[in-house]
Amino acid sequence: MGQDDHEDAGQQSPSSASLPSSPFFRVSLQDGITCIRAIRAPKIEDILAIGAELAETGDHLKRLWDYSHIEFPFSIDELRELGRAAKLINRQNARIAVVVADDLGYGSMRVMAVHFENETTSLAVFRNKQQAIRWLNET
């Protein structure tokens, strides 16, 4: 998706200057999607800090959280906490995709998604990045 596509949609494209940094994640922009790739197991606080920075600008309306390259580190209780807290910081009209490769991580993130649900932000869990990108680009 090019710059013209963003302008036609009435949205401003996020810039790489507005990307947060973290020792746990690599954050990049790819075709209008903000990709947050876990490079090592984060804590819940680390996820919430990056999420809050992205939500604060209002520019990052399509987000792909990629946990497919790490062993899934969270308990169900931690994911409930993450879902509730993330719900409070994500109040813009955004789409968030989460990619988790293993069965335990996939099921666990589905639990988090239930606690995250709100009226303005859509969140979906996927097993591969291509499916997540297709969903993020749906109108």
Image (cartoon, helix red, strand yellow):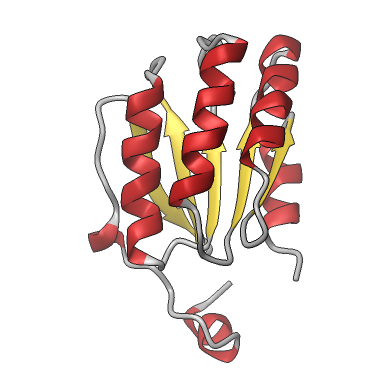
Quarter that holds the C terminus: bottom right
Q: Which image quadrant for residue 43?
A: top left
- Is 31 left, or right, of 28 in this rendering? right
- Is 110 left, or right, of 20 in this rendering? right
Q: In the rendered image of this protein, does residue 79 appear above or below residue 74?
A: below
- Is 28 left, or right, of 107 in this rendering? left
State the residue in front, 139 or 83: 83
State the residue in front, 33 or 117: 117
The residue under the point 58% across, 82% down is: 5
- The percent position of residue 124, horizontal first and vertical second, equals 71, 42
Specify whether residue 48 is in view: yes
Q: How many marks?
A: 0
State the residue in front, 85 or 75: 85
The residue under the point 26% across, 33% down is: 22
- The percent position of residue 2, horizontal first and vertical second, equals 53, 77
The residue under the point 56% across, 9% down is: 75
Q: In the rendered image of this protein, does residue 75 appear above or below residue 1?
A: above
Specify whether residue 69 is in view: no
Q: In the rendered image of this protein, does residue 124 appear above or below residue 45?
A: below
The residue under the point 76% across, 44% down is: 131
State the residue in front, 108 or 137: 108
- The percent position of residue 101, horizontal first and vertical second, equals 68, 20
Q: In the rendered image of this protein, does residue 106 appear above or below residue 51?
A: above
- The percent position of residue 45, horizontal first and vertical second, equals 34, 26
Quarter that holds the N terminus: bottom right
